[in-house]
């Protein structure tokens, strides 16, 4: 009995020290709606971080903020919401979700805003930014209807403060008109949010490495390819996957998340950035709407949202699946296909493929023994359930464009 009590106490302690990060918007510059960008998502930057004690943080207020607001409204009903909002800077893609965030228009809620004083706006910069978005003739709803309590805190690079046991550090990054990077340290783990940064200025490069040192998760601006960054996009205030890898290595980061995808980068482009980065730094992920990262004493766990839309048919047949396992080794095995749609499939595998890695699914159709055909499909792994299908793993796959068959596996 005493052993059981000790196990329950240990489990309770573990639960207490879990922090969860969720990505609601991952695109940079402007939202995208194109079909070729849906897999990673088209909303502009917004992240939610729930600290182990339940304190809510929001990182930036791009169009992803609308979805977060709808989720909070549905989950909490009429109960009050108290949250802390860290804004990196005032460019449109990082603030344009503010007028569409339902909890701002509910009187029972309270929000604490943090950002820097812009030399273009002067004191109370963030308050001015919010009020200007709801000013005539830009928006039909007046600021007086934003009834939630709002507190504004003016900070600058080098500031450190604590909120309910969570430590926050801000540093200036290299971006036109200014931008703050944030380090948020919880009892479950540490997150560094460093979007909108261009490398090459010693002061800001040092700021970033100080923020990122030994972080569990580094979310880094990877908008351009290294070639773009060195040529036509130089001076635009953004970075590349290669710079992210360099920082992750130098600062001994545990996980790197490529973020702020260019609006003109289709899913296949981001796939390529991710594949290249993983060759240099295996613990790399590409930010995807709905992706979540949990941090605790047990380590880091990454999960993807369910991405297979459309009608699905329950069935059961075999296919040959090849790809890369979670430990980086190639595999090939016979698998059971449990359901199938035009967008993806649910497979039962013995192996554990890495999330966001590429697999090949080969289905043999043998309705007529004299005229068997083979359907070969490329897919990316978006979901994993350990041991869900009896002794096998449940693996969700989204099929991707196969117009470039020469592209190597992840």
Image (cartoon, rainbow, N blue to C red):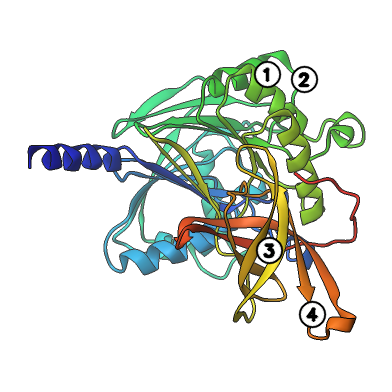
Which of label 4 and label 2 is nearer to you? Answer: 4
Q: Quarter of the image holding residue 152?
A: top left
Q: Mark 3 or mark 2: which comes first in sequence?
A: 2
Q: Which residue is mark 4?
A: 366
Disc 2 and disc 1 in contact, CB within 8 angstroms: yes
Residue 398 is marked as 3
Dot 4 falls on a residue whose secondary structure is: loop
CA distance for labels 3 and 2: 38 Å
Q: Mark 1 or mark 4: which comes first in sequence?
A: 1
Q: Residues within 10 Å of mark 1 (few under 14, many from 20)?
A: some
Q: Mark 4 or mark 2: which comes first in sequence?
A: 2
Residue 4 is marked as none
Observer-nearest of 280 and 365 = 365
Residue 167 spot, x, y in % from top left: 38, 28
Q: Quarter of the image holding residue 267?
A: bottom right
Q: Which residue is mark 2?
A: 200
């Amino acid at each position: 009995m005493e052993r059981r009590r000790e196990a329950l106490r240990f489990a309770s302690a573990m639960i207490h020290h879990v922090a969860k990060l969720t990505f609601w918007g991952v695109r940079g510059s402007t939202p995208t709606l194109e079909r070729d960008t849906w897999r990673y998502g088209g909303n502009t930057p917004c992240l939610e971080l729930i600290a182990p004690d339940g304190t809510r943080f929001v990182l930036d207020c791009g169009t992803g903020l609308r979805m977060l607001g709808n989720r909070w409204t549905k989950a909490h009903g009429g109960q009050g919401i108290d949250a802390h909002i860290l804004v990196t800077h005032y460019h449109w893609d990082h603030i344009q979700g503010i007028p569409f965030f339902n909890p701002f228009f509910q009187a029972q809620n309270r929000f604490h805003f943090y950002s820097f004083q812009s030399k273009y706006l002067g004191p109370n910069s963030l308050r001015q930014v919010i009020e200007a978005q709801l000013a005539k003739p830009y928006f039909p709803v007046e600021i007086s209807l934003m009834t939630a309590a709002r507190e504004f805190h003016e900070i600058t690079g080098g500031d450190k403060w604590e909120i309910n046991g969570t430590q926050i550090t801000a540093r200036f990054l290299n971006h036109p008109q200014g931008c703050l990077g944030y380090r948020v340290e919880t009892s479950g783990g540490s997150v560094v949010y460093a979007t909108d940064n261009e490398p090459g200025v010693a002061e800001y490069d040092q700021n970033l490495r100080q923020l990122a040192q030994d972080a569990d998760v580094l979310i880094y601006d990877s908008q351009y390819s290294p070639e773009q960054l060195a040529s036509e996009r130089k001076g635009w205030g953004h970075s590349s996957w290669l710079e992210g890898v360099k920082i992750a290595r130098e600062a001994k980061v545990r996980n790197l998340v490529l973020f702020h995808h260019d609006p003109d980068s289709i899913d296949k482009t981001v796939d390529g950035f991710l594949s290249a980065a993983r060759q240099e730094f295996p613990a790399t992920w590409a930010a995807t709407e709905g992706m979540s990262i949990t941090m605790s004493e047990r380590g880091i766990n990454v999960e993807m949202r369910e991405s297979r839309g459309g009608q699905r048919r329950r069935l059961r047949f075999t296919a040959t699946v090849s790809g890369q396992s979670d430990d980086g080794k190639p595999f090939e095995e016979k698998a059971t296909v449990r359901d199938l749609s035009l967008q993806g499939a649910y497979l039962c595998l013995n192996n554990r493929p890495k999330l966001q890695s590429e697999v090949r699914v080969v289905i043999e159709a043998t309705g007529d023994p004299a005229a068997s055909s083979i359907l070969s499909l490329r897919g990316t792994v978006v979901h994993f359930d350990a041991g869900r299908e009896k002794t096998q793993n449940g693996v969700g796959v989204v099929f991707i464009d196969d117009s470039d068959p020469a592209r190597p596996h992840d």
